[in-house]
Image (cartoon, rainbow, N blue to C red):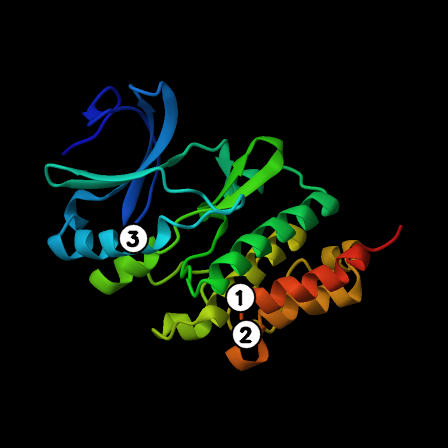
Amino acid sequence: MHLKSGSRLGKYRIEKKLSSGGFSSVFRARDIHEGVQVALKVPLPGHQTVELIKNLKNEVRHLAPLDHPHILALKNADQIQETFFLVFPLGQKSLTDRLKSRISARKALGYTEQILEAMAYAHERRIIHCDIKPDNIIVFPDDRLRVGDFGIARAARKTLSGSGSGTMGFIAPEQAMGQVSMRSDVFSIGMVIYSLFARQLPRWPFKKWPGMERMRRLLSAEMIAFILRALAVNDKERYRDAIQMHRIFLRIKKNALRQR
């Protein structure tokens, strides 16, 4: 099914394509019954295989019960003819877009706490995200963040060779080799937090830290050490999961920003 502005997918009228990646496209659409705008995530036509749809449906069963203010809730999952799609609340923009404008250190610290709250909740339920990155973190009114795409990357990885295994720049070294754990999510979380404060990303083999001078102006030594531990190349040197990472963050949050 070819989707374009004005076309229908069940009760959803397509308004605009918002983004497209290696696995799926996201559209802004209107629920003609409820009268609200939503985000539709639709696997690309070449990926709409029986095996992928089966894996996505299995993930949906695990993800539907997730209920947290900083996790993007799944509103609906449906299949019309051969097109399987997922429906989510429509946010204002992705964190990628938000990073294009100024973010104060205090605001970045608030974003950090929201991301960690969401991921600690997921890890408590033994759910690994597999593809944490700014594109998958959606900004809602009042600067509320919601982490999205839970399980979708994992379902794709089960099915598509070379897809859904994470995103370059945010993927943990061991995950790139096919070994995924909660510590892999910790690494990706660390990369997102680093980008919030440094406004740049380090590159493999992670021996140089661009933007470190900026971080030193903004953050305490303890907060910088907190971030760098999440980015350890050896996964055993990282936090074991987002639960531990969140707990330590709450302990140091009060003194995380440098006093001017």
Q: Amino acid at mark 2?
A: Arg
Residue 100 in view here: no
Q: Which residue is tagged 2?
A: 240
Whole-percent x and y of residue 177? 36, 75
> Which one is in front, 253 or 78?
78
Q: CA distance from mark 2 to mark 3?
A: 26 Å
The residue positioned 67% from the left and 58% from the top of the image is 211
Residue 162 occupies quadrant: bottom left
Quadrant including the N terminus:
top left
Report the side of 207 relative to 5 (left or right).
Answer: right
How far apart are labels 3 and 1 at the CA level? Answer: 24 Å
As drawn, is 255 to the left or to the right of 187? Answer: right
Q: Residues within 10 Å of mark 1 (few under 14, many from 20)?
A: many
Query: What's the residue type where badge 3 is placed?
Result: Arg
Query: Which sits earlier in the primary sequence, circle 3 or circle 1?
Result: 3
Q: Secondary structure at mark 2?
A: loop
Q: Give the residue pinned by disc 3.
A: 61
Q: Are marks 2 and 1 in contact (CB under 8 Å)?
A: yes
The mark closer to the camera, 3 or 1, is 3
